[in-house]
Image (spheres, rainbow, N blue to C red):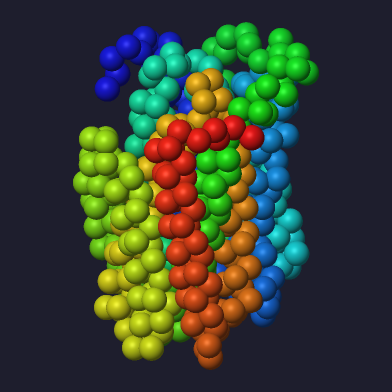
Amino acid sequence: MLRGLNRQHIRVIETVASIESLRLLGIFFILPVFTIYGENFSNSGLLIGVAFGAYGAAMALFQIPFGIVSDHIGRKKTLIIGMIPFVIGNLMCWHPINIYILIAGRFIAGAGAITSVSVALLQESIPEHRRNIAMAIVGIPVGLVFMVGVLVGPLISLYLGTSYIFLITAALGVIAFIPIASLNETRNPMKSYTLKGKRRRIAAITSSSLKFGTISFIVSALMFSYFYYLSQFHQQYIPKVSLTTLLLVPVLVGGFVAVVLSRYADRGKTTQVTVACLSLLLVSVPAVFILAYLYHNSVMIVVGSVVFFAGYSVYEIAFPTLVAKHSPRGSYGSNLGVYNVLQFSGQLGGSLVAGIFIGKYIYGIGPYITALIFVIALFLSMGILRDILRRARSGEEDNL
């Protein structure tokens, strides 16, 4: 896997993987328990949803500005700048005096939108023919961090208190300065771009990337709605079962299914794998939001969660690769940036859907409406995916 990569390439990969893993670990800690934490500051499901999704909204809003800044002052300085609001925002969330400070803290934390900067650093530091491998290597610890985060987060909440997750996350952000400081950045080649050159770069963004981004918006929205709903369901109907126990089997089984299916993707079966991913997510929606709600038991929520995590884990592996595959040579970073903006926007969208239709307590037709929204959205996603693949087979022009 490391063939064709020298020591400097590996060092950059390790640095990017360390930064992203440290930053995301704290974010994943809070996912399963944030809704309950938000209830300490507001009785409004909508405001709790806004607080939950504010991080993603800021990430979406500041991805491109941070990318532009990094083009001018370099990746290393921008990474340092981006970690500062991340740390400050999480400290604000540690002991907010009301829901509005919590929202502000989440937004400020998300304003350190360095994902695209990290990707750009990786792209310009690694030979073109090894960039996809480099992204895959970075994705391994990120995937592990996701599994650890959603399992350990509830334990931290139980034994230390949910507020301490934000303190730990801020501490992880401080630790992330260490790999950033050790980064030996070469001169940024993008500094010399002309305005005309930038226009050409924007023109390299493809309609496929926008379509993949739309699918990513929907899947990301589903993920945040799922975690919002799960914490409410757990607290309301099965509080005697620990949240970590509830998530253990789904996360492990889902990760195993993702590894198996990703092998098929590596053998040229990417199309089948992505269709399977969306199909699994589609099946999980009625299981989680309708059947589990009807029977109020842990078995159905675990079964639905297994299917959900299997689909979501495959999505995390397969879709960034598809963006690369359908991007013109030399414009992978730009297209992934568009993809990331839409993905992070979905976090706010999903939080608002859950906040409006599920609220602080699960009752009435809210879960049914939520399920209907995502069933329709996922059918739309399948139609978008089929259109992308049809255009690719016919060789139609894709650049915007």
Residue 277, by quadrant, is bottom left
From the top left corner, tell me how far across and down residue 278 is, in percent: 38, 58
Image side of residue 390 versus residue 45, left or right: left
Residue 88, by quadrant, is top right
Image side of residue 3 versus residue 87, left or right: left
Q: Residue 168: tell me if it is visible.
A: no
From the top left corner, tell me how far across and down residue 343 is, in percent: 56, 49
From the top left corner, tell me how far across and down residue 274 is, in percent: 35, 49
Question: Which residue sits at x=61%, y=27%?
Answer: 204
Quarter that holds the C terminus:
top right
Using the image as rendered, state which of residue 166 and residue 254 is in the foreground: 254
Q: Look at the picture and state if 327 lies above or below 227.
A: above
Using the image as rendered, state which of residue 382 and residue 396 is in the foreground: 396
Question: Which residue sits at x=56%, y=52%?
Answer: 214
Image side of residue 107 versus residue 288, left or right: right
Question: Which residue sits at x=58%, y=56%?
Answer: 346
